[in-house]
Image: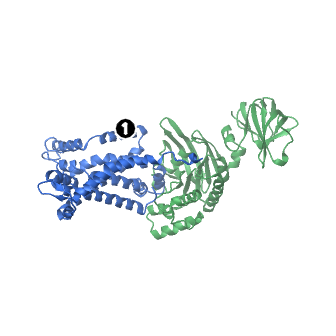
Chain colours: A blue, B green
């Protein structure tokens, strides 16, 4: 009668993704780790070895600033995305079923656009010659058409365009499952619609909100194309500099060291967010 | 004194009418049950009173003040929702004190009042706990305490006990009723359970298809239903089709002459006779019927009687049990003064 006790999903199925993960992620990561401690041959490539010179270079004010820029840009994009996506999703779940499906399909369509298309579209749209600047000048808001790219604003717009659908898709299931009576109860007890939103809807959905923040943060932390297309060099993120070192400066050990750092920062941020989400929280 | 008045209250959702022209007055301090089958509009009516739905037409007045245009959060009602709607991110005490926190009352007062309220619903010492650490019955009490936190003028409850198991539900009905009597707060409860309504209510409002069918004291509705729907919905009854002419009912198998106390609520012609199972007796002469089934329930005995393909139920106390068996032919007589003749 042992068969009765058996689980429906056999445990060994889990070995397949585990093996893939090992082959496609852990092994390349191990190679990258070994490269990051290799000895650089100036003007050439690198030879195997163990030295921490590449890591030491990371602790200079210059790279500190780059790291800070990367984190701030990604965190900013995550905050803006979720701040837009959350009310959007709450309103979306209040619509009729058919309208909800339509909006979700449009969002999924946006996901199919590549970073390249989004980047070039925005840089055209925000340019002086063909962009919205002409429209603003024509209305009379500005005297002459202006260029809005490259700038931090253009970069943020691009990253948010990229991250917004993900934030909505992460928030949609928990928001649509939210008991509408919670908000109504807050209203009956004297909370205005805005206060009900801030004191009940938001804290109840703390865990999904933290999840959406982490997702967009990690997603935009690795952004490589948009900072070059829409940002100024001082907005360049770590990813851009990694490419710069690896391809144009032929310094693979240093690029690998920066990549390891990027991974650690991403992990640290995820861990921090999980910790903050759990501290006072209730099981989601 | 009238606490809550509804004037021609109507709510339509598109082409469907949920509540149709409801006008009634609820006196101060009464416990009112809105009773009806699911989909009869009772929950919509409660939501209209609370301001969670906007009426298509009509008015809601509290103590003579028109509340129709007043947003929900300025109405100062207390309400218990069907899902209870306790906030999972707050502790029990914070839940109970939420209406006070919203009104800007200071922390010390809030804490004191929350302790009082939890004491009142007999749940001391759980203030620091989380909602998910409480049992169903405890959550129920917390929701009631929270609804009463601001001493509301009107306390509204939407199927508050539906999530509890049968024993606990009966216990909570009594407790809720006693609490309401102690506080004297005007209370409106929505329920589809007639026993629950009979247990708790001073005033029963029976609804069907968006309309109020009858309003009154529970026993008045039981003895003197206004129509066949109310007769069938409050308690159980036998509805026997017949023809009324003068004070005599013609029905298949014989005639029944109405006694003095019997009530007639329809014009002559086609009618239905409503007779309660406990008012059906076996006699020497009367309508012939066959015993189709006997249900021994311990506290009572139920006879299901067949006559012309129609069933009539008779209920006896065990010590009055007639000595008849399955398949026997009996003759039925009805307790005089207990019959109601209604429009079909």
User: Where residue B255 sits in the image (x, y, percent)?
Assistant: 81, 31
On the rendered image, what quadrant is the C terminus of chain B found in? top right
Image-based side of B125 in relation to A230, left or right: right
Q: Position of residue B272 (x, y in %)?
A: 72, 34
**Residue B337 in sight:** no
View extreme (bottom): residue: B108
Res A49 seen here: yes
- Between A270 and A18, the one nearer to me in the picture: A18
Q: Position of residue B144 (x, y in %)?
A: 56, 58
The residue shown at (26%, 52%) is A222
From the viewer's side, name the closer residue of A58 and A131. Answer: A58
Furthest residue in direction front, as rendered: A48
| Corner quadrant of residue A123 | top left
Name the subunit of mark 1.
Answer: A
Residue B145 or residue A207, whichever sits in front: A207
The N terminus of chain B - image quarter: bottom right
Check disc 1 and report the residue beneath it: A102
Instruction: Identify the residue shown where x is 28% and y is 56%.
Output: A263
Residue in front for this viewpoint, A178 or A243: A243
Q: Crowding near pointer 1: few (<14 within 10 Å), some, many (20+)?
A: few
Q: Residue at position x 51%, y 69% from top? A: B112
Q: How many marks?
A: 1
In the picture provided, is A280 more to the left or to the right than B61? left
């Amino acid at each position: 009668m042992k068969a009765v006790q058996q689980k429906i999903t056999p445990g060994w199925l889990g070995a397949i993704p585990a093996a893939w993960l090992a082959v496609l992620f852990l092994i390349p990561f191990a190679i990258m780790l070994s490269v990051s401690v290799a000895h650089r041959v100036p003007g050439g490539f690198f030879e195997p070895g163990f030295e921490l010179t590449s890591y030491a270079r990371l602790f200079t004010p210059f790279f500190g600033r780059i790291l800070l820029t990367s984190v701030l840009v990604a965190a900013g994009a995550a905050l803006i995305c979720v701040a837009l996506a959350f009310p959007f999703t709450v309103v979306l779940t209040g619509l009729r079923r058919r309208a909800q499906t339509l909006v979700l399909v449009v969002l999924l369509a946006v996901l199919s656009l590549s970073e390249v298309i989004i980047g070039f579209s925005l840089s055209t749209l925000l340019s002086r010659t063909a962009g919205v600047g002409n429209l603003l000048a024509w209305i009379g808001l500005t005297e002459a058409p202006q260029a809005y790219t490259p700038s931090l604003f253009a970069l943020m717009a691009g990253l948010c365009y990229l991250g917004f659908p993900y934030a909505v898709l992460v928030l949609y299931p928990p928001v649509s499952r939210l008991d509408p009576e919670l908000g109504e109860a807050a209203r009956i007890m004297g909370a205005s619609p805005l206060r009900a939103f801030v004191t009940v809807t938001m804290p109840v959905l703390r865990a999904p909100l933290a999840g959406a923040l982490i997702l967009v943060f990690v997603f935009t932390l690795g952004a490589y194309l948009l900072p070059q297309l829409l940002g100024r060099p001082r907005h360049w993120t770590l990813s851009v500099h990694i490419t710069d070192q690896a391809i144009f400066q032929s310094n693979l050990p240093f690029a690998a060291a920066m990549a390891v750092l990027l991974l650690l920062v991403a992990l640290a941020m995820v861990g921090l967010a999980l910790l903050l989400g759990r501290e006072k929280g209730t099981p989601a | 004194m009238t606490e809550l008045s509804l004037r021609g209250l109507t709510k339509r959702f598109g082409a469907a009418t949920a509540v149709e022209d409801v006008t009634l007055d609820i006196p101060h301090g009464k416990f009112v049950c809105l009773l009806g089958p699911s989909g009869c509009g009772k929950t919509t009516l409660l939501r209209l009173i609370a301001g969670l739905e906007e009426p298509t037409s009509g008015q809601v007045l509290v103590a003579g003040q028109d509340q129709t245009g007043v947003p929900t959060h300025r109405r100062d009602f207390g309400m218990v929702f069907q899902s209870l709607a306790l906030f999972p991110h707050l502790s029990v005490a914070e839940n109970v004190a939420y209406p006070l926190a919203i009104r800007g009352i200071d922390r010390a007062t809030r804490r004191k009042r929350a302790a009082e309220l939890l004491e009142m619903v007999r749940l001391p010492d759980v203030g620091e706990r989380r909602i998910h650490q409480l049992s169903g019955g405890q959550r129920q009490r917390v929701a009631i305490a929270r609804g009463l936190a601001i001493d509301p003028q009107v306390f509204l409850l939407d199927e508050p006990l539906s999530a509890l198991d049968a024993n606990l539900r009966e216990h909570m009905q009594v407790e809720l009723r006693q609490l309401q009597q102690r506080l004297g707060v005007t209370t409106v409860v929505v329920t589809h359970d007639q026993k629950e309504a009979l247990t708790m209510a001073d005033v029963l409002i029976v609804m069907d298809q968006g309309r109020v069918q009858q309003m009154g004291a529970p026993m008045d509705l039981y003895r003197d239903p206004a129509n066949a729907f109310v007769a069938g919905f409050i308690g159980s009854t036998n509805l026997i089709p017949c023809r009324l002419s003068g004070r005599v009912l013609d029905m298949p198998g014989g005639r029944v002459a109405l006694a003095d106390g019997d009530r007639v609520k329809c014009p002559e012609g086609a009618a239905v006779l409503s007779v309660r199972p406990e008012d059906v007796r076996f006699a020497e002469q009367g309508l012939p019927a066959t015993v189709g089934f006997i249900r021994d329930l311990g506290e009572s005995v139920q006879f299901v009687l067949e006559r012309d393909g129609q069933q009539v139920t008779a209920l006896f106390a065990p010590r009055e049990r007639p000595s008849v068996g399955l398949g026997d032919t009996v003759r039925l007589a009805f307790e005089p003064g207990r019959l109601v003749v209604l429009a079909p």
